[in-house]
Image: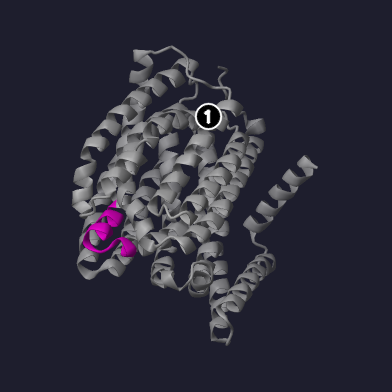
Amino acid sequence: MPNVQISDKTAKEKVFSGVFWKFSERILAQGISFIVSVVLARILMPEDYGMVAMVTIFIALADVFVSTGFSTALIQKKDASETDFSTLFYCSFMLSLIIYAVLFFCAPYIASFYKMKELSLVVRVFALRLPLSSYNAIQHAFVSRHMIFKRFFFSTLIGTLLSGVVGIFMAYKGFGVWALIGQYFTNSIVDTIVLSITVRWHPKFIFSFSSAKNLMNYGWKVLAADLSGTFFNHLRSLIVGKLYSAADLAYYNRGTNISNLLTNNIYSSVTAVLFPAFSNESDNLEKIKTMFSRSIRVLSYLIFPLLAGCISVARPFTLVVFTQKWEESIYFIRIICLVPCIELVGHLSIQGLKATAHTGELLRNELFNKPPYIICLVVGSILGVKALAVSMLISSVIGTFININAFKKIIAYSYKKLFTDLASAVLLSVTMAAIISLWNFIPLSNLQLLILQILSGIALYILLSILTKNESFFYVKNLVISKIRKTT
């Protein structure tokens, strides 16, 4: 396997090409998934979504062991070899079997914890995705390491379409919660199969203990940090499911899902490319600082208006798209949509810490984040499920400052520079959201109001960007135009 280095001459082109294909893949996946989720939300009950969310925390934690530390170590290592990839695949696969066995035997206890006997079988079936994830994670690491994100596009297209058909068919036939499980499984299986065809990497019968040891020295700290982050990110869902009801959990998660729908297309696309790009420049802190600053300006310019607009249109959007039975989720959509705005810079800082191999700082940050997180969580739990959403917002503010503070020292990035990078996007987004919120006083149907707010919001944001000569607007426009010209 040839080693891949990104030269100064081609770095910008490769990074943008990666962002283009990753963004296209995310737009495609989220677009189809959103259509499918709308159909499923109209057929299934909130309780069905709540049941899946109850077991997701356990599957997500297991998935961290199987994929996160291994794949990140492969991406970060500049000279990752065929031996490294195959070695970590076998480590990941064996660990996935062990963890599945643990979940299989713990399933009745998980069901007892929630006082829902039917969850035992759900856990045992859903956890079967873990061995598949062990292979898929190494495939994704190979694609990211070589920045060939175009391959994701095709696997996602086929997997998302087929899984959507399976999920809707099963829901229509009355399978309830199993329609969601079937959708997840189909997506994972097809994604893995298509990547096996389109990506040249396949595991070979080679294993190196020294390779495993060296990669684990890096990977275990990332794994520990991600394990802590994943656990605490899902802890609110666990508490809501335990203290309240499956329906309450579904309403809460609907707010999270809408927020992710708007931000993951952009955020995951850019960060998936930035991590290997940062890694290839890990010895050049000045270049990383420039890339970091540019990423903040562009991401905030793209993400902030989406979230501000969503807060403004939350009511007509929910009632038109998901129907009246999801009205309780409006509050959570409005609160949780603020979280990605706050966490943006913190997440980019985490990518920088991983790429520059400051994994000790990464783990230390996780430990510092937890006391204020737990305090917010306890207070929110006492006050009620709506207060839990607010506590998420407060802990995000604290966690973001902790993550920023660690990385800014490494690259000499000041808070003054951070304020400058964020100011334009904040002002434009708040202005746009305030104006379209005025349309709520016009006597229109929910559908008419939703269309008016969305169209006017887009037009206003572009107009304000042009009038203020926003640098990120012209940067994104020029990059898109240059990419279109190359493909025509």
The vertical placement of 415 against 194, above or below, is below
State the residue at coordinates (48%, 38%).
188
Where are the magenta residues, as a range?
A: 235-248
Q: Is residue 302 toward the left or the right of residue 349 in the image?
A: right
Would you say residue 244 sits in the magenta stretch? Answer: yes
In percent of width and height, residue 326 lies at 42, 69
In percent of width and height, residue 378 lies at 20, 61
In the foreground, 111 or 319: 111
Q: Is residue 447 toward the left or the right of residue 177 in the image?
A: right
Q: Which residue is mark 1?
A: 145
Q: Is residue 483 toward the left or the right of residue 335 in the image?
A: right
In the foreground, 256 or 379: 256
| Res 185 quadrant in image | top left
In percent of width and height, residue 192 lies at 51, 32
Identify the secondary structure beneath mark 1: helix
| Res 120 quadrant in image | top left
State the residue at coordinates (61%, 40%).
153
According to the image, what is the colour scheme of the structure? one colour
Q: Main secondary structure of the magenta part?
A: helix
Specify whether residue 370 is in view.
yes
State the residue at coordinates (38%, 52%).
177
| Res 395 quadrant in image | bottom left
In percent of width and height, residue 22 lies at 58, 42
The vertical placement of 392 against 85, above or below, is below
Which quadrant is home to the N terminus?
A: top right
Specify whether residue 361 is in view.
no
In the foreground, 118 or 289: 118
Tell me the amino acid under the disc marked 1. Answer: Arg
